[in-house]
Image (cartoon, rainbow, N blue to C red):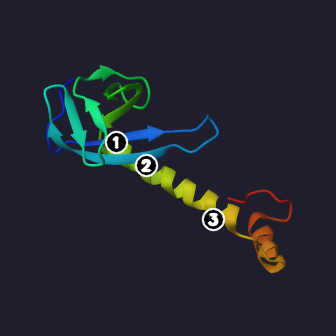
Amino acid sequence: MRKLRVGDKVYNATQNGFSDFVRYSFSEVVSLTKTLAVLKNGVKLYNEPRISYITESVGYSVSRQKGKHWHLVSLEAIRKAQLENENIAAHEWFQKKEFTLEEKKQIYALFGQQGEIVP
């Protein structure tokens, strides 16, 4: 566990309830004070690593909001964010899209006559 340094890339993951998607925010440390790390997006973190059970084992608490943590970026976190963003885009597309009868028939044909997903 180390303190943050200028140039470190960090991320935060938030979720509104268990059924919501995880939404990732990424930023970079741009300056340091004696106790804080200031991110490019203006968020101030206590520059003291803490045990975190949110998404990573180590996190940095948001100043005046100790329940919120930011974490050092890893390749695994980037991949999780990419997959989650694909899920969000697909979900939002289906929420906004109104299918014509012809489109519904094509979808039905793709998933089989019984309405089950065909591998």
Residue 32 image position (x, y, % from top left): 15, 35
3D distance between C-alphas at marks 2 and 3: 18 Å
Considering every residue shown, the one lying at the far top of the view is: 51
The three-letter code of the residue at mark 2 reads Ala
Q: Earlier in the sequence, mark 3 or mark 1?
A: 1
User: What secondary structure is marked by label 1?
Assistant: strand
Considering every residue shown, the one lying at the far bottom of the view is: 102
Residue 4 shown left or right of residue 110 in the figure = left
Please state which of residues 24 and 117 is positioned toward the viewer in this rendering.
24
Residue 58 image position (x, y, % from top left): 31, 25
Label 2 packing within 10 angstroms: few (<14), some (14-19), many (20+): some
Q: Quadrant of the N terminus?
A: top left
**Residue 55 position (above or below residue 1):** below
Instruction: Quickly name the residue at label 3.
Output: 93
Q: Earlier in the sequence, mark 2 or mark 1?
A: 1
> Which corner quadrant of the image does residue 10 belong to?
top left
Instruction: Quickly name the residue at label 2.
Output: 81
Given this view, does label 2 or label 1 mark the residue nearer the observer?
1
> Which corner quadrant of the image does residue 77 belong to?
top left
Label 1 packing within 10 angstroms: few (<14), some (14-19), many (20+): some
Considering every residue shown, the one lying at the far right of the view is: 114
Please state which of residues 17 and 80 is positioned toward the viewer in this rendering.
17
Instruction: Quickly name the residue at label 1.
Output: 11
The three-letter code of the residue at mark 3 reads Trp
**Residue 69 tag number:** none
The three-letter code of the residue at mark 1 reads Tyr
User: What secondary structure is marked by label 3?
Assistant: helix
3D distance between C-alphas at marks 2 and 1: 10 Å
Residue at image point 80% right, 77% down: 100
Residue at image point 80% right, 64% down: 112
